[in-house]
Amino acid sequence: MRVTPIPCLSDNYAYLVECEDTNESALVDASEAAPVLKALEATDARAGKGHPKEIWSTHHHPDHVGGNEELVARWKVPVLGHASDRGRIPAQTRFLESGETFLLGKLTVRVHHIPGHTLGAIAYLVSSPGGGSAVFTGDTLFVAGCGRMFEGTPAQMHGSLAWLAAEDAATMVYCGHEYTAANLRFAASVEPSNPDVAQAAARTRRLREDGKPTVPSTLGEERRHNPFLRAGSPEIRKSLGIAADADDVTAFAAIRKAKDGFR
């Protein structure tokens, strides 16, 4: 499996996912068409492989689906998204339910419904037959952060993040935005003694100074430095005045509220 981040808009990522055994590929979150087409034309590794066979949308927000119609008109390919996003994802032709699996070449793709940011958000968990996996989380799980809850509840978002965090620690995380530096500033403010936060911040600075994306992370790394996966942390609870005996959903909601107002 090969995954290529494609910067779009001001801070979005689309992703080209390729099965290296069969040369079949898919595009995740077509924010806009022009950068995708430019990336495909400019990369020698794509020569002779043709266009992606599918577009996978993680949710309906325009900054993730704005290029769907132009690319479908050019490529004549299906657009996948959650069944509940019918009528909200442009050009959608496949309406997925949680637990569905399908193949991209020899890669196995498992769909999981992860409501919270939106009610129809889904993750695509892609596994290679030789080992290795990647998850495309849209705006639900970011590197060191999570999305705002525009449609869902704290319980839904916490449950979605808990499902993601329970997957294999080595799974590579590909999220929808380059928000990592800001997310880690917040993480450091609520858990300043966490060495994994400091290490991730140093890595982020190096990557951004070199003009490189901060994706991917891994689920193991996220469990160590992402405050939204660490609602039980005594230091985070103390920093934000969350009761030690508060349940994790209550703690998560308080962390999300604090991040909403963080500057």
Image (spheres, rainbow, N blue to C red):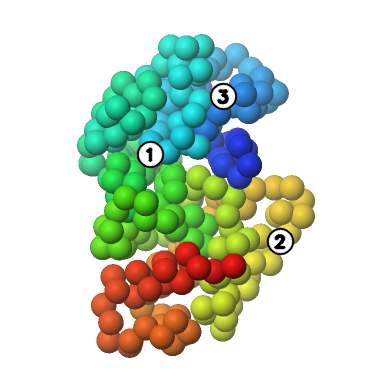
> From where the camera sits, is residue 171 visible?
no
2 vs 3, front mark: 3
Q: In the picture provided, is 214 more to the left or to the right than 26?
A: right
Q: Regarding mark 1 in the picture, which secondary structure is present there?
A: loop
Instruction: Name the residue that disc number 3 marks.
Output: 33
Instruction: Name the residue that disc number 2 marks.
Output: 205
Q: Regarding mark 2 in the picture, which secondary structure is present there?
A: helix
Q: Quadrant of the C terminus?
A: bottom right
**Residue placed furthest toward the right:** 210
Mark nearer the N terminus (1 vs 2):
1
Q: Looking at the image, which residue is at 50% across and 18% down? A: 71
Residue 213 image position (x, y, % from top left): 64, 48
- How far apart are labels 2 and 3 at the CA level? 29 Å
**Above or below: residue 215 compared with residue 219:** above
Q: Looking at the image, which residue is at 28% across and 82% down? A: 246
Query: Residue flagged by tag 1: what amino acid is it?
Result: His
Q: Quadrant of residue 185?
A: bottom right
Residue situated in front as seen by the camera: 73 or 131 = 73
Instruction: Name the residue that disc number 1 marks.
Output: 59
> From where the camera sits, is residue 31 visible?
yes
Residue 152 image position (x, y, % from top left): 29, 53
**Above or below: residue 18 compared with residue 74:** below
Residue situated in front as seen by the camera: 14 or 46 = 14
Residue situated in front as seen by the camera: 195 or 169 = 195
Residue 253 image position (x, y, % from top left): 35, 69
- How far apart are labels 1 and 2 at the CA level? 29 Å
